[in-house]
Image (cartoon, rainbow, N blue to C red):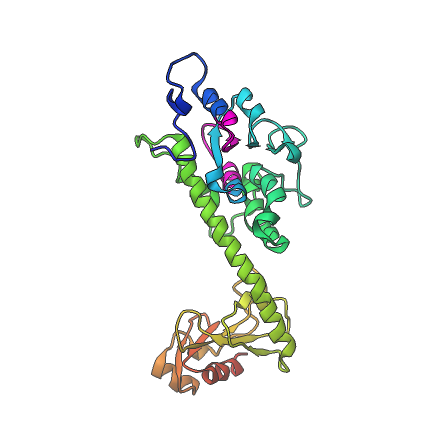
Amino acid sequence: MPSANMRPTHQTACGAEKKNKTNVRVRLFYCLLYSGGMQTVIVHSGNFHPDDVFAVATLQLHLGKENIEVIRTRDETVISKADWVADVGGVYDQDRRRFDHHQNGAPVRENGIPYAAFGLVWKHLGESICASKEVADSIEERIAQQIDAGDNGVSLYTLNEHNVSPYELYNVVGTFRPVWGSGTTDDEAFLQAVDFARELLVRTIAHARAGEKMKLLVQAGYEAAEDKKILVYDQSVGRNSFIEFDEVGVVVHPSESEEHKWKAVVIPKGYGTFENRVTFPAAWASLKDDELAQVSGIEDAVFCHKNLFLFVANTKEGALAAARQAK
């Protein structure tokens, strides 16, 4: 069934009962244009990619999903009259709400990654949606640049000796395309992909906002601590939050997933690496409960990860005792 936000392209749309030679989608557009209700959002018809999917998802967050009508077409008559146009039309002009990147002279970021539709829309609406420049910038760095690079044919990685490619958002969005023989239309599949993209953005924004709050907590604890090699918090914190603080080796905090448990976690040497500044003793690897308690000398020991970056105890004191043995 067609979505409520992509109206059926047949003669009954807006009450137009009789047939004529005008393209059905063009008639639909003019019905919407003069109805005074929905704002029209145009993207290209046919196959879809993450940039047009995420561009529409962004506009739904900005305007409200219930307030826009998505029309997928390459008809210049329809495009010229639309409220918003993304990834089609050959024009980038934010004042006219046109966000295409296929034309000559399309903008390029300072780091050399060209903009695609999602990046252009996010550039102008992201901060308003997130109510935070820092959060909007994190979406730009983590999602928009990767999508835009792929859409413009810019490779962001080289394979190492394992010869395994990452499973990217392009692969994920590609799974929403109609399955051969299913009877699903491109338009139906597109809106399903948009629903996924919108939810992904909502959740990523929520995590980023929480991360901004966590930064304040982390900073306050760091500044208050006399011994900055081992920091103790009464709330769960992420270990990557301490990478900027060179002195910190281990952080102790309550478990976010197990009530009445405490964790000691070591800090990575940098972002995107599995190397850590310190590790727990090698003899503790993969041990748990009584066996770990006997080897470590920590009575309430629960578990030590085999990669020696995580120790769990039943008490703050137990986790702190483990932290002191990390070297």
Of 62 and 136, the residue lying toward us? 62
Image spot of residue 217 (x, y percent): 58, 70
In terms of image quadrants, where is residue 7? top left
Asked if residue 200 is among those painted magenta in the image, a careful observer would answer no
Of 42 and 170, the residue lying toward us? 42
Name the residue rendered at 61%, 54% in the picture: 132
Please report the bounds of the magenta region as a residue range.
Answer: 32-57
Of 224 and 285, the residue lying toward us? 224
Image spot of residue 124 (x, y percent): 63, 42
In terms of image quadrants, where is residue 302? bottom left
Name the residue rendered at 50%, 75% in the picture: 253
Quarter the C terminus occupies: bottom right
Q: Is residue 18 above or below residue 189?
A: above
Q: Is residue 324 above or below residue 39?
A: below
Q: In the image, 119: left or right of 1? A: right
> Looking at the image, can residue 272 be seen?
no
Q: In the image, 282: left or right of 87? A: left
Asked if residue 37 is among those painted magenta in the image, a careful observer would answer yes
> Looking at the image, can residue 305 be seen?
yes
Image spot of residue 218 (x, y percent): 59, 70
- Figure disc tally: 0
Image spot of residue 197 (x, y percent): 46, 44
Name the residue rendered at 39%, 22% in the picture: 15
Name the residue rendered at 43%, 86% in the picture: 298
